[in-house]
Image: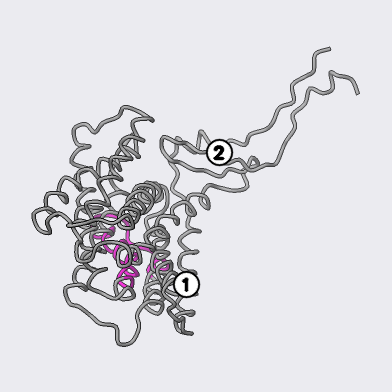
Amino acid sequence: MSDDSINCVCHIRIVAVCVDVENLNVKILDMKGLTTGNTGIALLTLLAPIAWGTTYITVTEFLPDGRPLLVAAVRVVPAGIALLLAGRLISSWRPQGSEWSNLAKSSLVNFALFFPLLVVAVYRLPGGVAAATGGLQPILVGALSWTLGGGRPRRRDTAVAVTAAIGVAMIVVRPGAGIDPLGVVAAIAANISFALGVVLTKRLPTPPNRIAATGWQMVMAGAILVPLAVAVEGLPVSVSAMNLGAFAYLSLAGTALAFVLWFNGIRRLPVAGPPLLGLAAPITGAVLGWLVLNEALSALQIIGFALTIGSIAYGAALPTDRPATEKATHTTPRTAECAPQPA
């Protein structure tokens, strides 16, 4: 074979993982166009609720008792500052005009209201009861999206959402669990706030720098929560090394990283997808209770696990929402070209 005959195109069937750091758009692309990025995005989004599933055991076992505002404030402020610094490395973008009001709305429901209400529910309710209200997320998101002008949820999505709520309840609710009325109200209000955050994040324009935008949301929430915590609860008398470690984990892993992944998933997955993926939070909490707190699992709970995991799988399999410009840029099959060798 002559050197000139080496001038060819070698089709190599490989899978490439392309990561756009600025927009956190993670896509798994088959060079022959046989797969899409849906699985990769769904799996990354799933990491957020898994991290949130550790919140109950972190708050109840490692943080000061009875300080929901302090926990909420310390959770968002370091996370927000870290994300603003990380966002600065990507671009010098800062909110302008209507972007400030959009961020303020999102900050209110995603953090300033949600976090304190969540911690109140965690303090006042058994872990199972607090987690069970999280099973309502797919139903709440579908209802709020429809109410605020979105499309009517498909019957199949609604059926899966109801099944998921039943599955979560089977996992986490136990006979004889103490029910505190204030805790129940806080838990329901927290989930409504969080569901509204999902809908707003899906509907509002995507900011140019998503990492910085998430950081701004958290810092705005901190501007409300810090003075409120000091006024209502006062400064903590003492903070142990264990408290500091738990705060660092909850803020950086369970808030900063988790919400960047979560918001990316909301924008790129169908509206029904992220709430179903979010059911991984109560499952994670139940598994940790089983492994760490030596809680027993019943046959009913195992059935609930099957129903909930099936609902999560359904959410992960929903088609990805992909912008037209991205499709044009990233879906073209690529080949490896063999350049002709010099004679």
Compared to residue 122, the image places residue 145 above or below, namely above
Is residue 32 magenta-colored?
A: no
- Magenta segment range? 131-158
Residue 106's spot in the image, x, y percent?
Answer: 23, 48
Classify 10 Å Cα crowding around label 1: few (below 14), some (14-19), many (20 and above): few
Classify 10 Å Cα crowding around label 2: few (below 14), some (14-19), many (20 and above): some
Identify the residue at the far right of this view: 1
Q: Secondary structure at mark 1?
A: helix
- Residue at the spot 26% in from the left edge and 60% down from the top edge: 144
Q: Is residue 313 left or right of residue 110?
A: right
Q: Is residue 73 left or right of residue 327?
A: left
Residue 23's spot in the image, x, y percent?
Answer: 41, 37
Is residue 138 magenta-colored?
A: yes
- Dividing the picture into quarters, in which one does residue 9 lie? top right
Tag 2 residue: 331
Q: Secondary structure at mark 2?
A: loop
Of the 4 image quadrants, the one containing the N terminus is: top right
Residue 28's spot in the image, x, y percent?
Answer: 56, 45
Of the 4 image quadrants, the one containing the C terminus is: top right
Compared to residue 214, the image places residue 167 above or below, namely below
- Mark 1 residue type: Leu
- Residue 291 — which label? 1
Compared to residue 69, the image places residue 290 above or below, namely below
- Residue at the spot 40% in from the left edge and 65% down from the top edge: 279
Residue 65 or 120: which is nearer the viewer? 65
Residue 115 or 34: which is nearer the viewer? 115
- Mark 2 residue type: Thr
- Dividing the picture into quarters, in which one does residue 12 lie? top right
Q: Nearer the viewer, mark 2 or mark 1?
A: 1
Alpha carbons under labels 2 and 1: distance apart: 43 Å
Magenta stretch: dominant secondary structure: helix
* Lower position in the chain sequence, tag 2 or tag 1: 1
